[in-house]
Amino acid sequence: MKKLIIHWLKVHEEEVELFTWMALLLLFISSSNIVLNNFVETTFLKRFGVQYLPLITAANALVTFFVFSFLGNTLSRTRGDRMMTRSLLACGLVVGLFRFAIPLNLEMIYPLLYILKTQLDVLLTFIFWNLANDLFGTRQSKRLFPLITAGGIIGGIAGSFITPLIARQISLDNLLLVFPLLTLAGAATAWRLGMTTPGASLRTQNKEETKKHSLQQGFSNLGQLIKKSTLAQVLLLLTLLPNIVIPVINYQFSFVVDQTFSSETGMLEFYSYFRGAQGTISLILILFVGRLYGRFGLPAALMFHPFNYLLAFLSYLFQFNIFSAIYAGTSVCVIRRTINGPANAALYGLLRPQDRAVLRPFLRGTVVRVGILTGSAIVWFGSEAMHPRYLSLVVIGVVGAWLAGTFLLKRNYSRILLDLIQDKLPDFYRMSKKELQDLFRGVDIAPALLKQFRTSSGEEVVWYADILRANKVEQLDAAILEKLPSLDEATCIRLLPFISNQAGEKAMAALKELANPSKPELLVALAQTTKRMTTKIRPEAEQAIFEATTDPEARACFLGWMREQNHEGLHSLIDGWLASEKLAERRAAVLAIREQEQVEYSDSVCHLLETEKDPSLLSLALRALPVLDVPDLSQQVARFLRHSAEDVRLAAIESLPLETENDVKTLIPILGDPVDRVRKRTIQRLGDTARPLQSHLIALMGSGSRRVQDGLFLVAQLLEIEETDLIRFNNDQLRVAYQSLDLAQWLESMAPTPSRDLLLIHL
């Protein structure tokens, strides 16, 4: 089972236990909620009345406000696993007690149960994801949360389909006793989860972290943000308007179901199979279709939901029956889960972090409740004056405004993205290439990206080149050729692979002007780029280039024809270059060995490393080693990590394999290199450390010089080291500190001696 999870779900071995318990916990929560939901909605409609649904919806919105306020204060003082366990036990107990109150024939039981089931859903879901955010880091959450969510959907599907089967065996009212059994299983899972998790990772917040802005301050900050941000205006519309129409469409759905099914059993079976089918469709789309909004572009994807609402209300208006209800309920739920939800999350990601901190709590708190209360008022007063089918006429205007908001986003989307590029939004640079392509789909961002590319340097210029190539911008080749002369050697080498093979003769001429014999690494990169641009060249043409070129290092890049037609001639040429007294020819020999992967010359390259003193030749030889069959590669390279020449140290850093614990430990001290370029490249190499070896990085954070320790923390940021690993490191450091303190106190009780005093100073 463990191997299956690792292989198919791409879960790391050390995450399997935690992932399994979290997925199982969400499964129990979802299945218990769906069983309770099916029972409560059925009994509320049949035993209390659909006409009271708007009032209950408004009451739910108000109660939710106080529930979240309570949660905010409680979560700041309680561990997440304990809060989860206690909440599940308390919820199960309260619902179980309601079962024994039903024989009293009190009508108020059913509206109370309706409010309770909504709040329990909100409560348990909120606590669960708060716990998940404590246990998993940012990088883990992107990979594991969709899988854990799928576990919740499976729980909802299972709970839906088993509800009518259980009801037939134990009677409808006894479903209230199934909920406590499922929450008890969930509580046991949460308890077991807490036993396997470091206590420090289930953190609590201090008072400063849990301070809330006042409502007046929220309005003030929001007003300032809306004045200057079109994106904030759109998000306000896309939050308020959907929550106005939700109570209306839910009321119409419940009214139709109530009118269609006269018995409680029939209604319960409908709710169960209907929601089970909904969950199945959503699960299939989530698991097998992927990020749907990326297929249409973000603005177009956000139009699906309001347009579907428009169709749903029109179907209710012209055909107010169960078929319209099934279409509306299914399509709205599926599109919200698979398209609108992920697209909205991506839209929030376009906000600046400081703006997001102001806007998101306000929109998801105050604005959502205002929308729900408004929608409930429309239903309450509208149902007094007209048949529920005609409520569609009232809210079609609201849906039209919602749809107009998405058109406003589409019209301004290019400008919003261009502003993000120009402002260099931090989250923007952390997005993957796939996420950026999804955001940029349908938007002409080439001019802005090219402008930023021309004014950038270092890492940024490479990032822009990567995005420009991903978006197939035709002017990229010309922009790179224009930019290369103003860049340092290292950045030039990194940009050359972005030049396309179709760059033409103009590019060849520009690259030739950059050739500088005093920069052998750049010279080699230029020759390799030239060769790549002529990759389809016939052997005869390649031979002609070889014969027309006088520089031996450039000639070394055009030896493919000789390897195919005259292998002995190739060996003779390389042997002659190796024996030459000219440095350029010896460099050409090493370059030819690397380019043509002449493994039989591995001993010759190693001999050069022993005898040569020239830094440029040593650099080439070190870079050639990884493609040759050198049995002791790490040992051959490691001795050059502290060479006096900067280029040699860089070549050694590039060539050192990071396959074992010793390799990682060998490279870590180079974080203390006095040259920033060398140190920066070391950080980048360690940033590529495989996950099984990352624990060794963490273990060494407390050793070495201050410069090495600072470098290790930069590597940890690059790797997005998980919080649990850092907690383990802190615990180890504290253990060593207390052991040293204990030993020092024991030594102080001994008779003074020089050795004792020296050991005390060390401790």
Image (tube, rainbow, N blue to C red):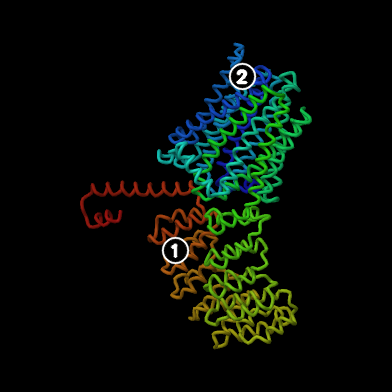
Q: In the rendered image of this protein, does residue 53 appear above or below residue 569?
A: above
Q: For numbered disc 2, what is the local secondary structure?
A: helix
Residue positioned 62% across, 21% down in the render: 176
Q: Quadrant of residue 39?
A: top right
The residue that disc 2 covers is: 110
Which of the two discs, 2 and 1, labels the residue nearer the N terminus?
2
How far separated are the C-alphas under marks 2 and 1?
A: 66 Å
> Are there few (<14), some (14-19), or many (20+) residues within 10 Å of tag 1?
many
Viewed as shown, does residue 387 lie left or right of 11? right
Q: Who is closer to the viewer here, 200 or 509?
A: 509
Does the residue at mark 2 contact the one at mark 1 (Cβ under 8 Å)? no
Q: In the rendered image of this protein, does residue 650 appear above or below residue 683?
A: below
The residue that disc 1 covers is: 671
Say which quadrant the N terminus sits in: top right
Residue positioned 69% across, 71% down in the render: 501
Residue positioned 43% across, 38% down in the render: 211
